[in-house]
Image: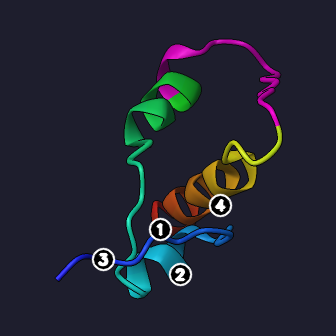
Amino acid sequence: MLKPIGVGTEVFHKLIEENKYYVDKTALLRTVFKENGSEVLLITRPRRFGKTLTMSTFHDFLAQSR
């Protein structure tokens, strides 16, 4: 059985809890939090390109690492 696609879902943990497809961005976590030495990071992408979902992923990752 195929998983549903989480179109419009902007919260990372909802995608995981509802067993929906998700493009894994965990490699981006390393780039942002370990390899990037700048104080400010600007993430620009076109509309509907996953910026909110990426920030939600960051939030959930950082909340668990406390």
**Residue 36: which quarter of the image?**
top right
Which residue is at the front of the view, 47 or 14? Answer: 47
The residue beneath circle 4 is 56
Q: Residue at x 41, y 49 (%)?
A: 23
17 up-or-down from 10: above or below = below
Q: Earlier in the sequence, mark 1 or mark 4?
A: 4
Which residue is pictured at 68% across the width and 67% down the height? Answer: 10
Of labels 4 and 3, earlier in sequence is: 3
Q: Which amino acid type is shown beneath numbered disc 2?
A: Lys
Across and down, in percent, residue 15 comes to 48, 75
Depth check, mark 2 against mark 1: the one in front is 2
Tag on residue 14? 2
In the image, the segment drawn in magenta is: 34-46
Q: What residue did someone put label 3 on?
A: 3
What is the spatial separation of the Cα atoms under label 1 and label 3, in whole angstroms? 25 Å
Tell me the residue that label 1 is attached to. 64
In the rendered image, the vertical position of residue 42 relative to residue 23, given as above or below: above
Residue situated furthest left in the rendering: 1
- Count of picture labels: 4
Marks 2 and 1, the one that precedes in the sequence: 2
The amino acid type, in three-letter code, at marker 1 is Gln
Give, as a three-letter code, the residue at label 4: Ser
Q: Secondary structure at mark 2?
A: helix
Pick the residue in front: 40 or 9.
9
Of the image marks 1 and 3, the number of the one nearer the N terminus:
3
First of labels 2, 4 by sequence position: 2
Dominant secondary structure, magenta: loop
